[in-house]
Amino acid sequence: MLYRILTENKHRDSIEALVGTFFNGFTLIESIGWWKGSREFGLIIEIQDADLASIEALAQKIKLLNQQESVLVQEIQCQAKFV
C-alpha cells in the first residue's frame, strides 16, 4: 500500500522532521493545488508499506502544525520493489 498525505507547504522543515520520527523513508513532493477557490502551495508526502494508524496519527499532527481545517490522506493499492 502506498499512502499519500497532502498538506499545505508551511513549516516544511518541521514537517520533514516530524515524518522522520514516524518513518525511516519517505518521499516529499512540492505541489500547487486549489482549495476553496484559492491556489495554495502544497506538499505531498508518500510513504510505502506503513500501517494506517501511524499514517493517520502523522496526518493529525501535520494538520495541527499547519493549523489546517483538514489534510488529505490517500491509500493507493500498488506493488513496489527495490531493484
Image (cartoon, helix red, strand yellow):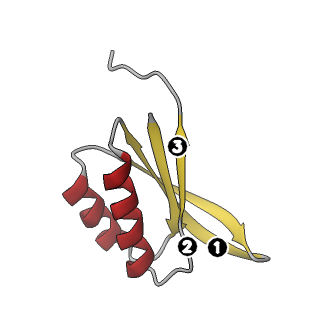
Q: Is residue 55 above or below residue 42?
A: above
| Residue in the picture at 56% in, 80% down | 69
Q: Quadrant of residue 33?
A: bottom right
Q: Is residue 35 left or right of residue 12?
A: right
| Residue in the picture at 40% in, 80% down | 64
| Residue topped by disc 2 | 70
Label total for image: 3
| Residue in the picture at 49% in, 49% down | 4
Q: Is residue 58 above or below residue 8?
A: above
The numbered mark, 3 or 1, whose residue comes first in the sequence reads: 1
Type of the residue with mark 2: Ser
The numbered mark, 2 or 1, whose residue comes first in the sequence reads: 1
Q: Give percent across and percent down for residue 18.
A: 27, 65
Type of the residue with mark 3: Glu
Q: Nearer the viewer, residue 35 or 12?
A: 35
| Residue in the picture at 45% in, 74% down | 63
| Residue topped by disc 3 | 75
- Quadrant the C terminus occupies: top left
Q: Residue furthest front?
A: 53
Q: Give percent across and percent down for residue 61.
A: 35, 72
Q: Is residue 18 left or right of residue 61?
A: left
- Quadrant the N terminus occupies: top left
- What secondary structure is marked by label 3? strand
Report if the CB atoms under discs 3 and 1 are less than 8 Å apart.
Answer: no
Foreground disc of the pair 2, 1:
2
Q: Quadrant of residue 59?
A: bottom left
Query: What is the number of the mark on residue 40?
Result: 1
